[in-house]
Amino acid sequence: MKSKYIIVKGIVQGVGFRPFVFRLAKENDLFGNVKNTSTGVHINIEGEKHQIDNFIKDLKEKSPKESKIDEIYVQDREIRKFNDFTIINSEKDEGTTILSPDIAVCYDCLKELDNEKEDRRYKYAFINCTNCGPRYSIIKSLPYDRNKTTMKKFIMCKECGEEYENPCDRRFHAEPTCCKNCGPKLKLIDKNNRHIINEGKNVINKTKKLLKEGKIIAIKGIGGFHLVCDGTNYKAIADLRKRKNRKTKPLALMMKDINEVNNYCFINEKEKKILNGSKKPILILKKKNNKLPNNISFNNDSLGIMLPYSPLHYMLFDDELKTLVMTSGNLSGMPMIYKNEEALDKLNDIADYFLIHDRDIYIPEEDSVVKVILNEERMIRIGRGYAPINFKYKKDNIIALGSHMKNTFSLCKENYIFLSQYLGDMDTVESIENYMFNIKHLNKVYNCNPSKIIYDNHPNYFYHDYLKYKDLEKIGVYHHHAHIVSCMFENNIDEKVIGLSFDGIGYGEDKNLWGSEFLICDKEKFSRVGHLKYMKMPGGDGATKVPWKMAISLLESWASNNLSISVEDLIKNLSMNNLFSYIKYKNYKTILYMIKNDINTPLTSSMGRFFDGISALLNFQNMISYEGEACIELENLAKKSKEVKDYYDFEISYKNNQFIIDRDKIVEQIFKDVINKEPASLIAMKFHNTVVEFSFSLCLYLRKLYNINLVALSGGAFENEILLTKLYEKLNNSDFQVLTHKILPCNDSNISIGQMVIGMNKES
Ligand code: ZN
Ligand code: ZN
Ligand code: FE
């Protein structure tokens, strides 16, 4: 007879781990107990040696699908003569455990949902079990127990209670378990009189009827509210866009099943697996045809699609309703709405009806967005199903505040780094409040009390006022260094790398706005060894929204370095040929004056702004209505060209230990192609190829000079599939080891991880 004490760490709570341990103990005739603590699952076990060995082996090999064991500690104990195996109440203690992300409804629960004759949860919208259901979004604190979640207020009925207590039941200790008699209920509400038009069993049918009539319904899901309408109804979608003031940004879809997706998009095996998996993100897929209304995603060769992930979502579909538009329920620039009252108040001008329920969401999360590029799943927006992500790393006690746009933050506690979900752009009071709420929440859940705070050196970031009052050790980090280090970290690289950070804008050491940076760096320091020649950015940050200002800036730069031409002549020449002609309706003369006289024209090396300028020169006329729109349009334009390998000539100069890529020559050739009426798609592709070529050439120089063979690619510009794919392949074919993002988004959502790792490696 032996006695052991076992501690299991990792994602082991909220994933059916204790019931699994219980069954394993019974199978092996072992006595003892199991409990959740805030450091993980703790097990007392007594029995014969071979049985205990078997138990530990199975613990590792047969653990529940959604769990992830990081460590198992086994200690000898005095024999205490247990006479049964039990699950005992949770305890709070010092230390760290890990929150489980939300899990999409499982196959067993779906079977029950459809089982009219035999199941008491037939058509019940909140069905879940130990293998599925909400977690992160409903947990208020750890350890994971029903009374620490928003399910606390629902007292289990007798039948649910029996399932919960029965070790042989799938709902044994399933914390959010419930049924029609004891759990949350749906209500359908009319926006005008806030009248409850339906409750109980016909709610879903009524909702579907309204959707089929072209109505817009705000539906409360797992991470927050969605605005939903029939995805095959052009007018309903147009109404939604108009009311939400969402001009062109693509809308996400939810489809009935994979067959439906197959009708509109190409899907490979990897993509099929992602769609059907237990995380259920929005997956960006290539369109097969244009059978769906074009106002779902204008001028775009792809669609963002997810499959239903909650029982409620499943029930919305039938043979007449197979495609729904499902976009975040928020007002432009604001965080996603997740409380009933707030939805009724703020979405009142958008939705016709509200489908709400009384299971509260504690932590709002957007749907995650992923895309398969170079045959790897790559994160674009980290949210439901993925967040929070944890990484094992060094022991420390830090918070990293992240970036201003596409914010996430990171916490380090003990040996773990925790990355928050995507929190959006920090331009509104509401977003900042949501950010503060989430910081407070995760600090509490993980029992963190950071002693160090890491921030971006940009002086205008939203958190600098807040920082002033914090009496902690503070470390400032440069944006592009953080990008590259996040990529190194994700790829487990400690050596020096050549880092390419291609991006919108990040504050640089010389106070200019960097964004096409070639860095030689490690996890502590960096030096800038190359970038695009600076461009003037008329009006500063504001130019980000108005791509044609960058086109003027690019033309002016070329003309000012060439005595024989003037920018006015260039513009005249274009408009005489019916090109770039929209410019005459803009106040471009003021902008030109500003550029020529250096009035409010900060310098930038941003790759994003370079793309913007070219996009505007080719066809993009308007102000952008979402971040990166002009760059995305340029990419979509390029995708319309046939396979083109040509690129424009470029010049790279070397001075003061830095390589400078001259854009003027590239702009000159593009200008000539435009005048010669070459197809815009061809020019767009040649431009992409040019960026790939000069980046590749510079990597060759840098390899020679610094003897480094590792290249890390980071920054939001690498969301561009052409750029990422072509540059990766080119580098790879020349025997570079290329590091790219998969788990972390390449955009500014990775900044907090880079900051964290730099903060941990910097000597203070
Ligand atoms: Zn289930
Ligand atoms: Zn019940
Ligand atoms: Fe960035």
Image (cartoon, helix red, strand yellow):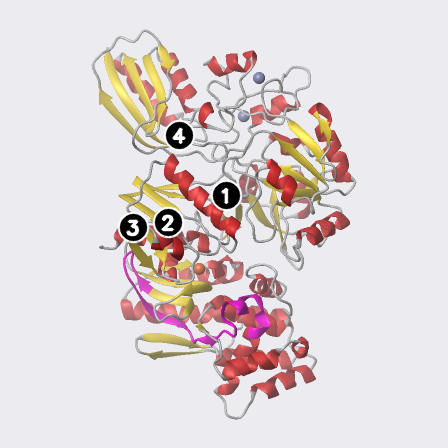
Viewer can see residue 377 = no
**Quarter of the image containing the N terminus?**
top left
Q: Which of the four quarters of the rendered structure image does ligand 1 lie in?
A: top right
Q: Which residues are magenta?
A: 520-549
Q: Which residue is mark 3?
A: 471
Q: Earlier in the sequence, mark 1 or mark 4?
A: 4
Q: Nearer the viewer, mark 4 or mark 2?
A: 4
Q: Secondary structure at mark 2?
A: helix
CA separation in Å, label 4 and label 3 = 28 Å
Label 1, label 2: how far apart the Cα atoms are = 18 Å
Tell which circle, 1 or 3, labels the residue nearer the N-terminal end.
1
Instruction: Report the residue marked by disc 2.
Output: 490
* CB-based contact (under 8 Å), mark 2 and mark 3: no
What residue is pinned by disc 1? 383
The disc, 4 or 3, on the residue closer to the chain's N-terminal end is: 4
Q: Residue furthest right?
A: 213
Q: Amino acid at mark 3?
A: Asp
Give the answer, above or below, for where 296 lies relative to 277: below
Give the CA distance from mark 4 to mark 2. Answer: 27 Å
Task: Answer with left or right where residue 11 lies relative to residue 628.
Answer: left
Give the vertical position of 576 relative to 407 (above or below): below
How many angstroms separate mark 1 from mark 4 (CA)?
Answer: 20 Å
